[in-house]
Image (cartoon, helix red, strand yellow):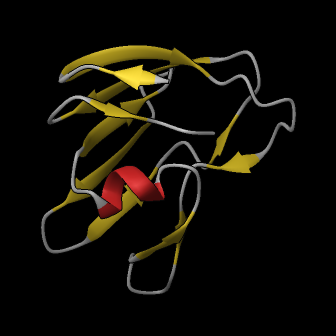
Amino acid sequence: VELSEGWNIIGYPVNDTGQPALILDDQNTVVGGILKPLIDSEVLIKVQDETGAAIEQIPVIGWVDGIVNMINGKGYRIKISQDTILEY
């Protein structure tokens, strides 16, 4: 999925509901999940679902995942710092 700098709206097309957006260790360090490549390349700013739950980096705490599982057919707002590609 091509993403442009700023806010984007994406659907979650993977048929397997329950894919973790992030997998965090005890220190809130991202060790897996479909958004890890965007974090590793330092372009992900925030992801928000339709209820307002968010994935974002909080200073001193680290990455916080209020969404937990991305769900097939749901839409998500994603904010990035530069044009990139998200691969599922």
Residue sticking out furthest to the right: 16
Residue 77 x %, y %: 40, 20
Is 17 placed above or below 26 here? above
Which of the two residues, 16 or 4, is positioned nearer the viewer here? 4
Against 64, residue 53 (above or below) is above
Q: Specify the farthest residue to the bottom.
A: 26
Residue 25 percent across, percent down from the top left = 51, 82
Question: In the rendered view, does 57 fall on the left or right side of 50?
Answer: left
Residue 61 located left or right of residue 10: left
Nearest to the observer: residue 15 or residue 87? 87
Question: What residue do we see at 57% from left, 49% from top?
Answer: 21
Say how many tags the image has.
Answer: 0
The quarter of the picture where the C terminus appears is top right
Q: Nearer the viewer, residue 53 or 8?
A: 8
> In the image, residue 31 lies at what x, y percent?
51, 75
Q: Quadrant of residue 14?
A: top right
At 20% from the left and 59% from the top, the residue drawn is 58
Report the residue at 55% width, 42% height from top. 67
Q: Is residue 27 above or below residue 68?
A: below
What residue lies at 72% left-to-right and 30% top-to-bottom? 71
Q: Is residue 32 left or right of residue 19?
A: left
Closer to us: 9 or 57: 9
Q: Position of residue 37 (x, y in %)?
A: 42, 56
